């Protein structure tokens, strides 16, 4: 785990929640190597690293957005550690303080729809609320997506059981379990076409080593090809 002192130096909490962290909205390269001094941008991957094939049989699609686009993955290695709170704070500040639009995506949600991180972010930032076909299959018949000029908050895949995505998908057994490639393709489609003035936030279900619905580590599966700098 990253020491709290390092996080405080690299990501000041007040600046983060006001979406004022230097470079947060102006450039994507938040990935950094933090030592005893200030954070420095990580060097770009080598040609050999980029050419290395994915170990997963369903490699994710290419990134949906340019690397210059303000888009970030929000990680947290456990439940209730603050991923949605941070997402809501950044989204709200982006809309109200910066006049940006926001495209928030929750690829995988369990405990759905009683528990909806997208609804929390939408309520905090004044975003429209929507759901992908898989998540929408569990919504009440009268549900209708909402729209907002401030942007959107969308849940792509959902399971009612409040458990890990792999456990919920396995236990519910409602249709085929989406592969990591299918999750990645849905995220890419949800982000595609976002204008340069739109901040994109993709909130994980757990940390990089948490398994996705297909019981594959998220960092090895759905997230690998999206190349989103992490928060």
Image (cartoon, helix red, strand yellow):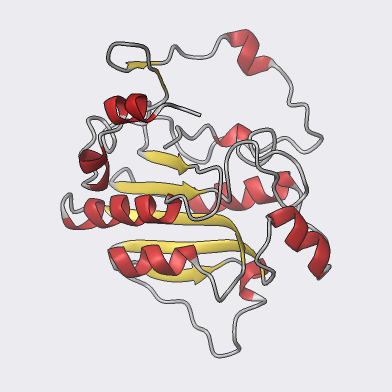
Residue 175 showing in the rendered view = no
Could you tell me residue 224's position as x and y percent?
A: 62, 33
Is 153 positioned to the left or the right of 222 in the image?
Answer: left
Residue 35 showing in the rendered view = yes
133 relative to 208, above or below: below
Q: How many marks?
A: 0
91 relative to 67, above or below: below
Could you tell me residue 63's position as x and y percent?
A: 54, 36
Q: What residue do we see at 29% from left, 30% from top?
A: 8
Quadrant location, the C terminus = top left
Could you tell me residue 17's position as x and y percent?
A: 26, 47
218 relative to 32, above or below: below
Q: What residue do we see at 69% from left, 33% from top?
A: 220
131 relative to 216, above or below: below
User: Which sits in the foreground, 89 or 62?
Assistant: 89
Is 136 positioned to the left or the right of 202 in the image?
Answer: right
Q: What residue do we see at 43% from left, 69% from top?
A: 119
Is 182 positioned to the left or the right of 45 in the image?
Answer: right
User: Which sits in the foreground, 127 or 88?
Assistant: 88
User: Which sits in the foreground, 86 or 62?
Assistant: 86
């Amino acid at each position: 785990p990253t020491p709290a002192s390092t996080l405080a130096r690299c990501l000041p909490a007040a600046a983060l929640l006001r979406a004022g962290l230097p470079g947060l909205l102006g450039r994507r390269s938040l990935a950094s190597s933090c030592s005893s001094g200030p954070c420095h941008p990580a060097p770009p991957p080598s040609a050999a690293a980029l050419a290395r094939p994915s170990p997963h049989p369903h490699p994710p699609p290419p990134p949906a957005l340019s690397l210059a686009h303000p888009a970030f993955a929000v990680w947290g290695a456990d439940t209730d550690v603050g991923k949605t709170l941070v997402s809501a704070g950044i989204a709200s500040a982006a809309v109200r303080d910066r006049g940006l639009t926001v495209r928030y995506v929750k690829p995988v949600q369990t405990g759905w729809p009683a528990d909806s991180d997208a609804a929390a972010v939408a309520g905090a930032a004044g975003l429209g609320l929507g759901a992908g076909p898989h998540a929408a299959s569990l919504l009440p018949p009268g549900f209708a997506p909402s729209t907002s000029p401030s942007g959107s908050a969308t849940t792509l895949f959902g399971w009612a059981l409040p458990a890990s995505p792999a456990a919920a998908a396995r236990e519910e057994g409602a249709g085929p379990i989406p592969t990591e490639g299918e999750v990645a393709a849905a995220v890419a489609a949800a982000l595609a076409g976002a204008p340069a003035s739109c901040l994109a936030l993709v909130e994980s279900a757990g940390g990089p080593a948490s398994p996705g619905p297909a019981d594959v580590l998220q960092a090895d599966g759905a997230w690998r090809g999206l190349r989103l700098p992490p928060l």
